[in-house]
Amino acid sequence: MEQLLKDIVELGKNHKFDELFDYGSEISSESLLEVMRFVGTDESSQEVLDSFLEDASIIHQTLLSMTLSSWIQQKQSSEPSIIKPRRCIRLLLNLIQRSTRFASKMPSDCVDLLEALLASSQFDPECLLILLKTSDSTCLEFQKSPRYSHLLEQVLLKIHQNSQDDVATCLAYFSTLLEKDYGFLSSCYAEMSPKWFCEVLDVVRCLLEHKSTQQSLKIHSNNLLFVLNLLELMTVDYVAFLTAKSKKEPKSVEERRGKTIEMLNLLVEILGEMCTNTEMTSHLNEKATAMNAVVDVLDTILHSESLFADFRAAQPENWPKLPETDEKFKQLLEKIEEEKRYEETQRKYADRPKQPPPSKILRIETNESLAELAKVIFEQYQKIEDVHGIPRIGELKLNCLKAISNLCSLCPENKLATLQNGRQGLLSVLQCTSRRPAYFMESYAMRNYSIFCVRQLTNECQENKEVILRLGEPQQPIIDRKRLLKEFGIDEQELEAAVV
């Protein structure tokens, strides 16, 4: 073992890695196998390994270079074999698992090599385990490399492509980064494209969902606070969010517009999950920032629905025209037919009041940031052929209701926050109980969540109870007030007595 490590150190010191040549060809595959087995099975190997700690960074880099070089050479061979490159990287993995001190010495120069090896898809289990086992130190060390964000992108790709074991390793790796690197999310936001940043947020969402069952998965509160800050930015100054990188990257504005709904959806869902994190409770209650942001998003969606209702009324009766033979439109076409049957059923009953179209929200129209955000959502509604975009709006709307319900359960002040600065959060939630056109692709659970959300808002909150009590009768009544109060579990007589 000692001789092999000396040979590896000498190779790393005296020869630069060149993928065009068989780097490390003088080191035999058999010697790699012998030492790999010894390190993996014999505890005495740690003492030998600790004597090489000064050159540990060279060993890391050289073994990864040998793996990549040998793999490239084997691909070009008439009889390719993955035996030697796999022994190189498995030896490194065994060395890392044998000594935590050795593991902590991995240099930032390894980022490029790990990225290339992951891109080859031949050494995914080994590379991912190496990243996980060294993450306590590399979470900061790797930031020195300009290719770090690209390495993270490769890891994110593996979550969708690989086995369940590899996915678990990826999630554990990101959990360590989110726990140890307090500014991890802000760095990803600054360095990554909107597409890849959404992938990172999706990992955060998965980790929060599994946090109750896997206590080892942790996220530092600073990273969760960044989620709240970003959501606040998107609602308070959406233009600033869009143009943050416009000088250096002119195309970034359109990229961010295109990913706005997906990003909002993830941010709001994460915010709802954060309510179960005791470390975040004070941040979610402080100045009602979280509740204000979520109500703003919900109001913006409702305002966009009103804009879309006007747009749709101006279209021909047979709109939208979608190719019936295209499989990707199958579900959407079924929803459109379902809506037509529903409308025909409504026309059969002349005495049944017609549901008025959703009304515009003046607060959104007069707010530059929210008006621009509503425009983006409206544009997505118009793109009926985008079979992924419209369902995501319905999902965002549902997540808003869940987040409002969870925030209400934290403290009474959050219930009052829905009435601050011109907001009418309870009325907005009530609007979600009405049936919307089916091809909005909303969940059938929307109405049930709306009712539950209203109960949360009115429970031990006199101000919100008064909002329901003072609901005026519209010109074409569509609400049975007594039935509504009963459905929400509110006693009308007790409510009136309390208000008086």
Image (cartoon, rainbow, N blue to C red):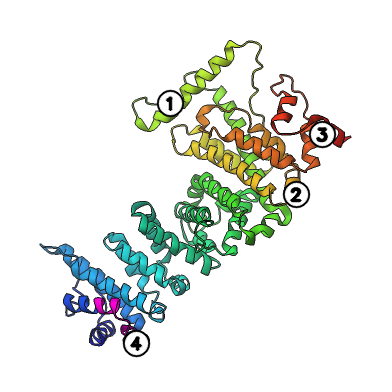
Q: What segment carries the magenta color?
A: 36-46
Q: Nearer the viewer, residue 20 or 123?
A: 123
Q: Nearer the viewer, residue 250 or 133?
A: 133
**In the current view of this chain or complex, which residue is farthest to the bottom?**
51
Question: The residue under label 1 is which amino acid type?
Answer: Leu
The residue carrying pointer 1 sits among few (fewer than 14), some (14 to 19) or many (20 or more) residues within 10 Å by Cα, namely some
How far is the residue under mark 1 from the one under mark 4? 68 Å
Question: The residue under label 2 is which amino acid type?
Answer: Pro
Q: Residue at x 34, y 89 (%)?
A: 51
Q: Earlier in the sequence, mark 4 or mark 3?
A: 4
Residue 373 percent location from the top left of the image: 59, 43
Residue 428 is left or right of residue 472, and the answer is left
Say if mark 4 contacts mark 2, CB within 8 Å. Answer: no
How far is the residue under mark 4 from the one under mark 3? 76 Å
Specify the quadrant of the image occupied by residue 20.
bottom left
| Tag in front: 3 or 1 | 3
Q: Which mark is residue 333?
A: 1
Residue 14 percent location from the top left of the image: 26, 85
Q: Which mark is residue 412?
A: 2
Residue marked by disc 4: 47
Secondary structure found at label 3: helix
Q: Earlier in the sequence, mark 4 or mark 2?
A: 4
Check the image and report above or below for 32 versus 115.
Answer: below
Q: Nearer the viewer, residue 419 or 281?
A: 281
Residue 373 in sight in this render: yes
The residue carrying pointer 2 sits among few (fewer than 14), some (14 to 19) or many (20 or more) residues within 10 Å by Cα, namely some
Residue marked by disc 3: 495
